[in-house]
Amino acid sequence: MPACFLPASMASKVVQPLLSSSRTSPVINLGRLSKDPATRALAIQDIARACREQGCFQVVNHGVSKSIMKGALEAASEFFNLSPEHKEIFASTDIRRPIRYDTSSRDGISKARSFLKHYANPLENWVQYWPVHPPTYRKKMGDYAVEIQRVSMQLMDAILQGLGLEPLYLQEKLENGIQFLALNNYPQFSHRGDKVGLAPHSDYGFLTILLQSSPGLEVMPHDDNTWTAVPAIPGALHVHIGDHLEVLSNGHLKSLVHRAVLNPDEARISIASIHGLTMDEKVRCAEELVDEEHPEMYRESSFQDFLDFLPSNINNYKRFVESLKTDRA
Ligand code: OGA
Ligand code: NI
């Protein structure tokens, strides 16, 4: 695999929408997936409903230890606290780099954030590009990435079964698929500035799994048109649907529009882990979900196609998934 990819953002943009409300997303106990078949079936149903109705949920009892989650946030925070020369080694505007640091809003959606983005799966291919400062970065972030990749496999298995697809559908491709980590660093909200740290968008891949140090993520559930703050439940991980799962599901599931607002009490760090197929693998509507009543609603596309789409989309506020819709959608 050529070691030369990194998007300015894994995201495509949407027009700025409405106000805030305070509904919460469902919290799902992931431990139920490894219990008896009846319990597992109920957990799959809960996940399917959350995906369909909200496009997101939180998971607890997911098996990622608190110390690994804490370690990842510490590694991220120590990286962002380094002096500029340590971070600027990774500064680049080339979206196809394997690791990239930036502080500006060149991609049009990052506002007051700085970020570090790099790939993580398979770890042995990518860890060589990761920072050596702070010295614990590779170990702590690596441990976290491996655990989150495992959770993503469990979640995809449940979600695909919830769509009525075979167990093990795409499993091998997902195991070898992309895991892309976006570490976001947001300043504390100041009354002089903008309250939005990351403008509304949906993510590129199948799933995003997000860890936040404090509240700031806001989502726009499908059955609503208002911003909903996602509470930072200690130990929980937030999960949402990306553009390529909308495509794979032939529109049964929709990718989630979300944004980040600055926290009035403290600076905030989030780690988004985005999961998809490999760079060149095309994602298309699952055949099983296409029939006369449900014609194919999206054109096939790969991560490479997404990278090609990004520069053409800098100022026109279109989401990637919108660009894939066929005239039957
Ligand atoms: C992202 C993202 C949200 C957050 O990195 O794509 O949506 O809370 N992050 O930082
Ligand atoms: Ni996002």
Image: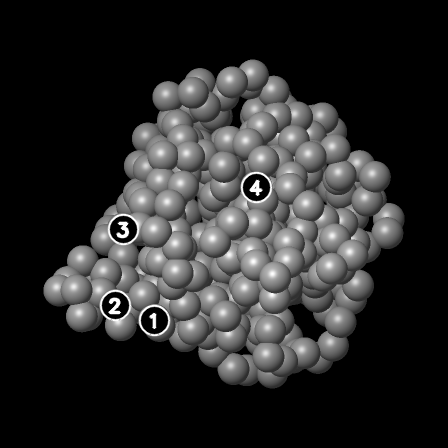
Dots 2, 1 in contact, CB < 8 A: yes
Q: Which amino acid type is marked by label 2?
A: Ala
From the image, tell me which residue sits under label 4: 283
Marks 2 and 1, how far apart in space? Answer: 6 Å
In this rendering, position of residue 104 left or right of residue 163: right
Residue placed furthest toward the right: 315
From the image, tell me which residue sits under label 1: 45
In this rendering, position of residue 52 left or right of residue 193: left
From the image, tell me which residue sits under label 2: 41
Q: Which mark is residue 129?
A: none
Question: Where, by quadrant of the figure, is residue 237 drawn?
Answer: bottom left
Marks 3 and 2, how far apart in space? Answer: 22 Å
Q: Which amino acid type is marked by label 1?
A: Gln
| 95 up-or-down from 51: above or below | above
Question: Where, by quadrant of the figure, is residue 33 drawn?
Answer: bottom left
| 224 up-or-down from 108: above or below | below
- Classify mark 3: helix, strand or loop: loop
| 309 up-or-down from 132: above or below | below
Q: In front: mark 3 or mark 1? A: 1
